[in-house]
Amino acid sequence: MNRNLSDLETTIRNRICRICSDRTAEGDCGREDPSSCALFRLFPQVVLAIQSVDSNDIRDYIHAIRGGVCAICHEQSGGSCETRDQVRCSLDAYLIPVVEAIEEATGRTFDTGVLPALSPVHLRA
Ligand code: SF4
Ligand code: SF4
């Protein structure tokens, strides 16, 4: 399936914002500054990072996100991220559904059946 980035972002917003704890009852982003959401602020880089991986091991995706997204995110400083530590990064908190949604939307399948047991905060060291 060949979708452009805008279509893909719409698809991912429909999937991830629906389960995000920051979503309001009306279905909007409840953050004071919705554009601060790293998942969509850096969406092209997120897609590139995920598409660079072909693995059923979530750690490979974590590595790609750290290198391709966190490395250029202004929230990260010296390799650490307070937003991540405070579980306020939606990309971090919902990494598995983000990977699933992007891979499904782009015609690949991420096999969650072989995922290792991980805490909900996937990108922590
Ligand atoms: S924080 Fe991000 S993922 Fe959550 S509702 Fe807002 S835009 Fe969607
Ligand atoms: S974990 Fe931190 S550095 Fe990485 S994308 Fe999220 S906010 Fe940015």
Image: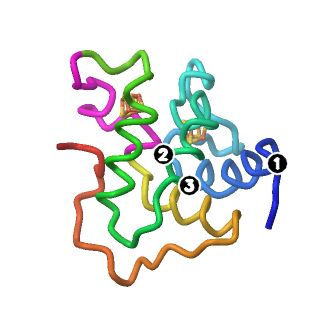
95 with respect to 84 (left or right): right
Q: Which quadrant would residue 3 be assigned to in this image?
A: bottom right
Q: Quadrant of ligand 2?
A: top left
47 with respect to 14 (left or right): left
Q: Which residue is mark 1?
A: 4
Label 2 vs label 1, nearer the camera: 1
Q: Residues within 10 Å of mark 1 (few under 14, many from 20)?
A: few
Q: Which mark is residue 51?
A: 3
Q: Is mark 2 within 8 Å of ligand 1?
A: yes
Query: What SS does tag 2 mark?
Result: loop
Question: Residue 43's spot in the image, x, y percent?
Answer: 61, 37
Q: Amino acid at mark 3?
A: Gln
Residue 85 vertical placement versus 109 (above, below): above
Q: Residue furthest left?
A: 125
Query: Which mark is first along the chain, 1 or 2?
Result: 1
Residue 116 is inside the magenta segment: no
Question: Residue 120's spot in the image, x, y percent?
Answer: 30, 56
Total of numbered circles in the picture?
3
Q: Which mark is residue 21?
A: 2
Label 2, label 3: how far apart the Cα atoms are: 26 Å
